[in-house]
Amino acid sequence: MKTVLCYGDSNTYGFNPSNGMRYPRDVRWTGRLQTLLGEEYTVIEEGCNGRTTIFDDPLEGWKNGLDYLRPCLNSHKPVDIVIMMLGSNDLKEIFHASPEEIAEGAGVLVRDIIDFTQNKQGFVPKIILVSPPEIGEGITHSAFYGNFLENAIERSRGFAACYKAVAEKNGCIYVNAAAYIQPSTVDSLHLSPEGHKKLAEVLQKTVLQEF
């Protein structure tokens, strides 16, 4: 039995842009991934709306992804695979972060996974670093406009190259989500059911290539 820890933000949580609630488990990419991988794998969902890589939100500081990472890894150990998709929330205007800075924030988390798991479970899991989907062109009409401005679109387009560099530097498996999926037209930020389905299929193939 292999344990797959999915660590991410609202697109890992399964935020439904149509009603602000949560997609059912069989719609979320994490739930779909469990079905695709079968009984030899346990897929753990650790998505949190608004989670950043390393940034403290001045209103909701508890959403810093680095702060919760070690307790999360410790709770679920031994962990065989970590799938991490974070960075979209770092594009919020309040952080003024470049794609390079955001990717390096993801790199900080990757190195923390490596150091902590080597110490606490005796081996380092396979780490699949996923660069998030791009921000949609319709963000100016989104309910999240204001938190995200027009400049977030272009910065999100820089994710792929920056995350790939971080993955290569740290020995991660790299997946460019933007090559397969786009955010829904509802809010230009969160995935549609079709996006969840496609991402699950891509990640299933990625996992099976490693095991």
Image (cartoon, grey):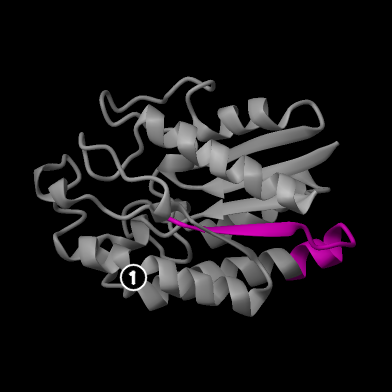
Tell me if residue 11 comes above or below residue 20 in the rendering.
below
Residue occupied by mark 1: 158
Q: Is residue 132 visible?
A: yes
User: Which residue appears at 10% of the width and 49% of the height?
Assistant: 140
Q: In this picture, which residue range is highlighted in magenta?
A: 115-132
158 above or below 13?
below
Tell whether position 16 is magenta. Answer: no
Could you tell me the amino acid type at mark 1? Gly
Give the position of the N terminus as an image quadrant. top right
Residue 183, how many percent across, how many down? Answer: 30, 43
Q: Splitting the image into 4 quarters, where does residue 124 fall?
A: bottom right
Tell me if residue 201 comes above or below residue 155 in the rendering: above
Could you say where residue 157 lies in the image, as x and y percent from the top left? 30, 65
Residue 51 image point, x, y percent: 44, 51
Q: For this rendering, which residue is in front, 162 or 73?
A: 162
| Element type where label 1 sits in the image | loop
